[in-house]
Image (cartoon, grey):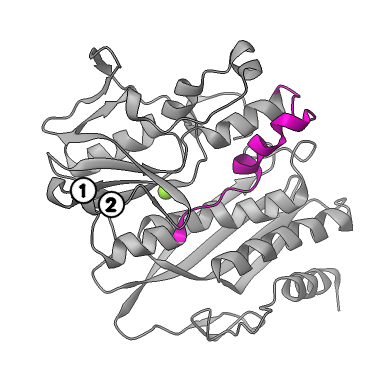
Amino acid sequence: MNKEDQLIARIQKRLSLRGGGTDRDAGLSLGSGDDACVLRATPGREWVASADAFLENVHFVRRLHPPASIGYKALARATSDLAAMGAKPRSYLLSLALPTRLPKRWLDGFLAGMARAARKFGMGLAGGDTSRAPAIAINLTVLGEVRKGRALLRSGARPGDRIFVTGHLGAAQLGLEIILRRLSGQANLRRYLVPHLHPDPPIALAQWLSRRELPSSMMDLSDGLSTDLDRLCRSSGVGASVREASLPLIRVPDSLVHRGFSIPNLALHGGEDYQLLFTVPARAASRIPPTRDGVRITEIGEIVRGRDVLLISADGKSAPLTPRGWDHFSRTRARPK
Ligand SMILES: [Mg+2]
């Protein structure tokens, strides 16, 4: 076996389906190991696919982020896009570019993290590719299934629909800021790192919403509420009105507020939450429970006519909610996100 074959064998071994899972469970007639995989479609369903790049020094920094978190998060953030469509995750293709002088320990940690995510989301490795590169580049293609014609789109929101989000907004960005400000050694802050290092997209909840046909539109929150809500509104050709007082904020120790952390700003603009943003027609809004599968669901506002996305403050004043979330192409300096 040459070096590349050894690396591929290592990846296949670490990411192989364990715990009784088979290629068939992952929607595959033929899994990884040949020139290509063969997908098996379940009758009455259609495939949903999405690709995601997770890059060293752009999305993560080797010195700050543990390898297991990088492996876990790479698959979690890709799979979040399947959840956003209401799809059931099935399998994934991993294209991995690694520097030559990467310690084996790093690769083992990375693969263990990715295996953990794959088990959690019920996905099997369908194939992939490896190559050498100056920095680590993780490219994932994820595949899921949805009932024919039932994929939840960004374009279905209509005036009068209620706007909902899951989880607590800004939690992932708070974790990143704690790491960047070198506060992650403080024991009372450690739990705030979890949403940044190990995001937990609400996949079961997304499928439940899809089965009940409740949302008129849905997407995942990857770049911050202000940016993602603007995208949803543009896709649907509508505006929105968000009540600031309704936003599900993270509760933090006073010490963080005194250090200048603005929790409302994190909720509006913080990226990488991998929670859901969806709209429901007003008549069905009462069928959305306050929590499901341990995930909080909060109504934060309403879809309106026109194109404006407004934020209504507690004292009733309204101001444009300008997209200020993550934008790869607007910054000159790479910053881990
Ligand atoms: Mg998305």
The amino acid type of the residue labelled 1 equals Ala
Task: Please tell me whether mark 1 sits on a helix, a strand or a loop.
Answer: helix
Please tell me the numbered disc located at residue 288. 2
Q: CA distance from mark 1 to mark 2?
A: 6 Å
Residue 260 in the image: above or below residue 322: above
Q: Which residue is mark 1?
A: 285
Q: Quadrant of residue 335?
A: top right
- Mark 1 residue CB less than 8 A from any atom of ligand 1: no
Please tell me the numbered disc located at residue 67. none
Pointers 1 and 2 in contact (C-beta within 8 Å): yes
Between residue 206 and residue 191, name the one nearer to us: 191
Instruction: Give, as a single range, the part of the protein colored magenta.
Output: 181-203
Q: Is residue 140 visible?
A: yes
Task: Please tell me whether mark 2 sits on a helix, a strand or a loop.
Answer: loop
Q: Residues within 10 Å of mark 2 (few under 14, many from 20)?
A: some
Figure label count:
2
Q: Is residue 277 magenta?
A: no
Q: Is residue 53 left or right of residue 205?
A: right
Between residue 336 and residue 329, name the one nearer to us: 336
The amino acid type of the residue labelled 2 equals Ile
- Give the residue at x 42% y 24%: 324
Q: Is residue 132 visible?
A: no
Q: Residues within 10 Å of mark 1 (few under 14, many from 20)?
A: some
Location of the N terminus (image quadrant): bottom right
- Give the residue at x 35% y 47%: 290
Q: Position of residue 215 (x, y in %)?
A: 25, 54
Q: Is residue 156 left or right of residue 187?
A: left
Between residue 265 and residue 243, name the one nearer to us: 243
Q: Is residue 105 left or right of residue 196?
A: right
- Give the residue at x 45% y 50%: 295
Q: Position of residue 331 (x, y in %)?
A: 53, 24
